[in-house]
Image (cartoon, rainbow, N blue to C red):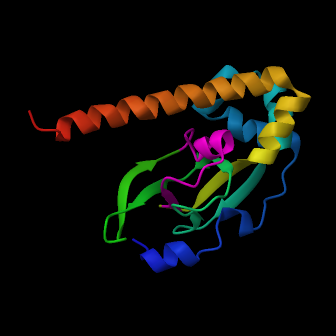
């Protein structure tokens, strides 16, 4: 586990080098995950024009709790650990997510500071959509933008339900 200082000082995912892939190659990578289920291949080819691809090493800090960066990360390959600071500012891993899952989607919707940190638990291939790219997608292709927004809303709803279930297990009678 990285220290609090390592998390805070890390440059973040957008400072990493982007991977140069064709539109079709990008669409094929996403199409191979369950995340793509709501989209046709033609829609994916349009969607990926608004996304960047990164291949990163294990222990790469994607973003840090409290920072104002606004981008969503779709995991294509690898694992990402979600980390929160406790009351003593010690980082604690709260969960690990894998391929076909997103993280950071709240930031492109509400623009608020990050509620947790994200660090790769293995080498990973990641797609990124910034808030500006999300807004551009919605202006240029509102149908695909609405489908993506609904997908994000469903994912956030699932996370809230899971968190509520875990919370009730920790509350006393």
Point out the image quarter for the C terminus.
Answer: top left
Instruction: Tell me, yes or no, whether the highlighted magenta stretch contains residue 115.
Output: yes
Q: Residue at x 82, y 30 (%)?
A: 138
Instruction: Tell me, yes or no, whether the highlighted magenta stretch contains residue 106.
Output: yes
Q: Residue at x 81, y 34 (%)?
A: 47
Residue 107: image location, x then y, percent: 63, 46
Which residue is more in the foreground, 18 or 116?
116
- Whether residue 167 is situated above or below residue 81 in the rendered picture: above
Q: Which of the 4 image quadrants contains residue 172?
A: top left
Residue 25 in view here = no
- Whether residue 90 is situated above or below residue 140 in the rendered picture: below
Residue 134: image location, x then y, percent: 77, 39
- Whether residue 138 is situated above or below residue 15 in the rendered picture: above
Point out the image quarter for the N terminus.
Answer: bottom left
Q: Residue at x 35, y 71 (%)?
A: 90
Residue 87: image location, x then y, percent: 31, 65
Residue 145 in view here = yes
């Amino acid at each position: 586990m990285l220290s609090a200082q390592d998390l805070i000082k890390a440059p973040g995912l957008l400072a990493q080098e982007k991977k140069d892939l064709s539109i079709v190659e990008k669409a094929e990578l996403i199409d191979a995950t369950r995340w793509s289920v709501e989209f046709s291949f033609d829609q994916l080819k349009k969607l990926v024009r608004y996304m960047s691809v990164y291949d990163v090493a294990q222990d790469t800090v994607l973003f840090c709790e409290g920072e104002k960066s606004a981008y969503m990360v779709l995991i294509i390959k690898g694992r990402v650990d979600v980390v929160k600071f406790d009351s003593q500012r010690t980082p604690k891993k709260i969960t690990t997510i894998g391929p076909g899952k997103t993280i950071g989607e709240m930031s492109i919707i509400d623009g608020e500071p990050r509620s947790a940190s994200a660090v790769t638990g293995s080498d990973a291939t990641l797609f990124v959509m910034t808030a500006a790219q999300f807004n551009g997608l919605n202006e240029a292709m509102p149908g695909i933008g609405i489908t993506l927004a609904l997908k994000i809303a469903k994912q956030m709803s699932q996370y809230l339900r899971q968190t509520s279930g875990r919370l009730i297990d920790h509350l006393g009678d």
